[in-house]
Image (cartoon, rainbow, N blue to C red):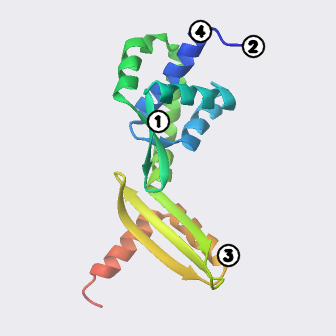
Amino acid sequence: MYESSSELAENKLLMLYILKSIKDPISNTQFTEIILENNFINYFTLQQYLCELESSDFVIYKKINDKQLLYLTKKGDTVLSLFKDRISPSKISIIDNYIKDKLELIKKELTIHSDYTLDSSDNFIVDLRALENQSLLMELKLTVPSKNQAVILCNKWKENPSDIYTNIINMLFNEDH
């Protein structure tokens, strides 16, 4: 069944509201997760709406550090400010609470990157990165002999990047060694 035009408008405005509330660009995956976890819109409709919002220049994708991130444009922000009252207060409350609870996790996913690839010698190259304000703070590439070791390094980096980063920096600046 097709949505009414007021429901369609509310859903698109809600999507703009989410982007504005997060204040930082996010990945399509993270954005989709927010919408689906709160049962606002089904996946296929969501992706269609995103395309329509992008065609209208209300949102744009920018490639930052190998990730396509979703931004709210000035035009999208203006439309949101004019029509925000069309979003039901209960949905705004749900989004505000969700973002308050999950914002740190969302930001961590955007600032911490870990990945591994197989090289020509059957070793694994592990790539660990930390970003701050979309700038590269640190990148560490290591070669390990097994996939298991590569996975362990990626998981440890994701679990505790700030401690690892701090330890490396302290060791590098320590003048006793």
Q: Judge from the rendering whether residue 164 lies leftward or rightward of residue 98; answer left or right.
A: left
Report the front residue among 42 and 56. Answer: 56
The amino acid pointed to by label 3 is Asn
Residue under numbered circle 2: 1
Q: Which residue is mark 4?
A: 5
Q: Amino acid at mark 1?
A: Lys
| Residue at 58%, 66% in the rendered image | 155
The residues bearing labels 2 and 3 have C-alpha atoms spaced at a distance of 48 Å
Residue name at image x 24 percent, y 86 percent: 175
Question: What is the distance, in whole Å, between disc 1 and disc 2 at their CAs?
Answer: 33 Å
Circle 1 is placed at which residue position? Answer: 100
Q: Mark 2, mark 3: which one is toward the viewer?
A: 2
Q: CA distance from mark 3 to mark 1?
A: 35 Å
Sequence-first tag of 2 and 3: 2
Badge 3 density bin: few <14, some 14–19, many ≥20, Cα 10 Å: few
Pointer 3 and pointer 1: residues touching (CB < 8 Å)?
A: no
